[in-house]
Image: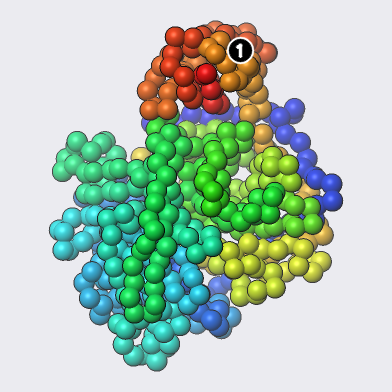
Amino acid sequence: MKSTLIILSLLGLFFSFSVNAQEQFTVQIEPLTIAEAPNIHSYSWGKTSDGKWLIVGGRIDGLHRRQPWAAFLASDNNTDIILIDPITDEVWSTSLSVLPLPLFEQLQSTNQEFIQRDNSLYVIGGYGYSATAVDHITFSNLTAINIDGVANAILNGTSINSYFRQTTDSNLAVTGGQLGLIDEIFYLSGGQYFEGRYNPIGPGQGSGFIQEYTDEIRKFEIVDDGTNLSISNFTMIHDTDNLHRRDYNMVPQIFPNGELGLTMFSGVFHPVSDLPWLNSVDITPSGYQVNNSFSQLLNQYHSAKLPIHDQAANNMHTIIFGGLSQYYFDANDNLIQDDEVPFVKTISKVTRASDGSMLESKLDIEMPAFLGSGAEFIPISDTQIFSESGILNLNNLADGSTHVGYIYGGIESSQENIFFINDGTQSEASNLIFKVFINKGLLGTNEIAVNGDSFFNMIAYPNPSSGIFSIEFSVPNDDPLTISIIDLKGSLVQQEKIDAPEGRFTYLLDLANNASGEYIVIIKGSNLQTQTTLIKR
């Protein structure tokens, strides 16, 4: 498939980013060589009480191949549990094959959901080959790992078996989602159930497969007394229109009112356009809120991320490192759209201001190669600057450069787009490690702020309406446009192609005879797309 590219002039679309009274800072990365660190991506991790990293799951190959017989081979599973000391540059490992088969199978899967609470690493789900099922499956397990216990066993060459416990629940059969924790409530958000061999042609081809997005935020408590392990108080929020996303970044946030929550950024795939999501979803203990006033164009796939809170200015920053994205900047700082969703070098920042507005910007540094997809940010052990939720307190940093953590692993690609030519040699799992520094007091000299809505700058009014909406937007060129109206079930309600003149244009939309409720209006040109939500009374 030929790439769809568009270059947009920065003139008039972007502007330098600064907010009064906020702490200025830049992000720096520096290579750290640990020769014995294994090549790995899409793994789970926890941290020992003395700062070592415990790594489990993930894969040791590169981007999965398109051919079902070659995709997600069991021989490329990570079947070891790995311990890394980033201070002494030492690495230890032992095989998971000594564990009972249910544990061994799940813990070598990829794209698990995981989180650490105290000394326990909780691992949920994951996708991979099961010898028991004689097929690739999504595992329905919750495994609790005693981090310090297994780390000491690895160091001492003793048995690791007693440090793993497992339970099974069909609600936990999820891969490619994210797991968050707020006030002892776990949030298993997004993701999918996948069974069978991957096939890009579709589930009805070849041996076939089952793919079901959860479309949910699943909330529960993990009851764990050190011996018994179970989940309780399970509830779910179902939304097929906004929670239909996987392989994204969910990041802890402090919202403007001071409440701790989570934000689901971007992800794939939008059910209508089969492209990444551009909006985000905020999660708090009281529920969730879809943010359609923000369009995230950069770093849309699961990669390393660092949340930073500026309490003095009440700003929440999220730094995202590399990965894949539908949009990126070229060497001349022109924004390029590529619907093949290529690997990128971009490092971006999303800032939520004290008024709740969000702004995305490209930082003035980038990854040194096409790196980051399936990588993780691992913070240093410093409770003075990191909260229990993993948010960095910017105000507690000293002026100047502070080492705050590491980026480890991920997929390294030889070029932007390899999916359709991938024979297994165009990418590989990385063992690269980067130290991450925050240089407080400095302002990036070439940050570029991105306003996704500026492509069309769409305004819908009145909204809500009893039926007649005026959709006003800017037409950037003379390409034909398609206006589509989608209901909350994902069904196409209306679609029309128009030849609008360049400049501002108003389209009258009549939904008077349609049922009350929410609708999504999508305006799409040959290379540009924007959307918003309409409410029909």
Element class at badge 1: strand
The foreground one among 146 and 151 is: 146
Residue at the (76%, 67%) spot, across then down: 396
Three-letter amino acid code at the position of disc 1 = Ser
Q: Position of residue 29 (x, y in %)?
A: 65, 62
Point out residue 273 in the picture as x, y percentages from the top left corner. 43, 29
| Residue that numbered label 1 is attached to | 470
Residue in front for this viewpoint, 99 or 140: 140
Taking the image as drawn, is residue 428 in sight? Answer: no
**Quadrant hosting residue 393:** bottom right
Q: Which residue is drawn at 50% across and 61% down?
A: 181
Q: How is the image coloured?
A: rainbow
What residue is drawn where x is 64% and y is 20%? 459
> What residue is drawn where x is 64% and y is 11%?
505
* Horizontal and vertical percent position of residue 350: 65, 46
> Can see residue 212?
yes
* Quadrant (top left, top right, bottom left, bottom right) of the N terminus: top left
Q: Left or right: where does residue 136 sit relative to residue 51?
A: left
Which residue sits furthest right?
A: 21
Q: How crowded is mark 1: few (under 14 residues within 10 Å), some or many (20 or more)?
A: some
**Residue 228 placement (x, y as % from top left):** 33, 75
> Is 185 left, or right, of 166 in this rendering?
right
Q: Is residue 50 above or below residue 418?
A: below
The image quarter in which residue 308 lies: bottom right
* Above or below: residue 419 compared with residue 79: above
> On the rendered structure, is 436 left or right of 41?
right
Question: From what the image shows, is residue 295 above or below residue 405?
Answer: above
